[in-house]
Image (cartoon, rainbow, N blue to C red):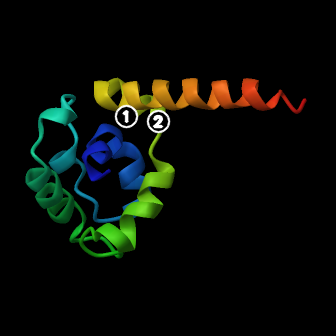
Amino acid sequence: MESWFPGDAEKLKEYYGKGFREGVVSGNTAIEGIPKADVMRRLKTTTEATSKGPHHKTKHAPYALKLIRPGVVARASPHCARLFRAAERLAGNEVRRLGDPR
């Protein structure tokens, strides 16, 4: 999931606040091409001077994930966009199967 975070550096900055080094994670629009180890290293470097401290998967990722914008990330990640489309199709099929409660 952290591989999606550079796709919306603006919201990451909003979560981490003062001391966030946006330039370390932003600028690469081909986020799927960044190796996971590099993503994790960049997140740590980007966040180490914030009041929340260096990025930690279980401590920070769930909260950061709530803030990132799906549309922004999907534009930077074709795989993410495909996942979202599949989930929407499945959800739509389930709503039709159960009958629209409206």
Total label count?
2
Residue 42, picture quadrant: bottom left
At x 18%, y 29%, the residue is 30
Q: Amino acid at mark 2?
A: Pro
Residue closest to the eye, 48 or 65 = 65
At x 56%, y 23%, the residue is 89
Q: Which mark is residue 28?
A: none
Residue identified by numbered label 1: 73
Reply above or below: 30 against 17.
above
> Could you say whether the residue bearing mark 1 is in a helix, strand or loop?
helix
Q: Which percent across, then down, holds residue 61?
A: 37, 62
Q: Is residue 31 left or right of residue 84?
A: left
Cα separation, mark 2 vs mark 1, equals 5 Å
Q: Which percent across, then down, holds residue 13?
A: 36, 53
Q: Is residue 28 visible?
A: no
Q: Which percent across, then down, holds residue 33?
A: 12, 34
Q: Which percent across, then down, holds residue 55?
A: 27, 68
> Could you say whether the residue bearing mark 2 is in a helix, strand or loop?
helix
Circles 2 and 1 in contact, beta carbons < 8 Å:
yes
Q: Residues within 10 Å of mark 2 (few under 14, many from 20)?
A: some
Q: Is residue 101 left or right of residue 17?
A: right
Q: Is residue 95 visible?
A: yes
Residue identified by numbered label 2: 70
Q: Amino acid at mark 1?
A: Val
Considering the image in quadrants, where does the C terminus appear? top right
